[in-house]
Amino acid sequence: MVRFKKRYIVLEVELPPKCKKEDRLLYFSLKNKIRQLHGEYGEAAVEKGLRVKYVNEQTNIAIISVARYAFKLVASTLPFVTKISLKTLYVGASFKHSLLFIKKHHEKTLRALRVSESSVDTQKT
């Protein structure tokens, strides 16, 4: 039996403020845009492997998984999704490495916030 290879895309997502089902909105907006850009072939190629694995509404980060053979179709579609704002942060071959990237990304963001807070505090005194 052959292993089903995937790619995991870590995205920074800006969703509409009153959105309840973030993962469904992300999934259907991607799927509709793939159909619009790549036609029935693109939709059929992505149908089996496209999944929204993780969405965090506090940090606005999401992870989607896609079959490796359909990765280029999805990656080429991401810039054209206008219903929600998407920014690709990382592409990895495993879910574990995607989570490690998110952890490092949060640590880097926190360090930058601490530095900016300390510089504001020194300017006040």
Image (cartoon, helix red, strand yellow):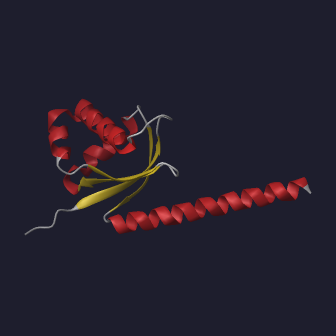
Query: Split into 4 quadrants, where in the image is the C terminus?
Result: bottom right
- Number of marks in the rendered image: 0
Q: Quadrant of residue 38?
A: top left
Q: Nearer the viewer, residue 35 or 64?
A: 64
Query: Split into 4 quadrants, where in the image is the N terminus?
Result: bottom left
Q: Residue 18 in the image: x percent, y percent?
A: 48, 34
Q: Residue at x 31, y 64 (%)?
A: 93
Q: Quadrant of residue 80?
A: top left
Q: Residue 103 in the image: x percent, y percent?
A: 50, 65
Q: Residue 91 in the image: x percent, y percent?
A: 37, 57
Outermost residue, left side: 1
Q: Residue 53 in the image: x percent, y percent?
A: 33, 55
Q: Is residue 125 left or right of residue 77?
A: right
Would you place residue 110 above or below residue 48 in this image? Answer: below
Q: Quadrant of residue 42?
A: top left
Outermost residue, front side: 20
Would you place residue 35 above or below residue 61 in this image? Answer: above
Q: Residue at x 68, y 57 (%)?
A: 113
Would you place residue 86 above or below residue 125 in this image? Answer: above
Would you place residue 117 above or below residue 75 in this image? Answer: below
Q: Is residue 82 left or right of residue 93?
A: right
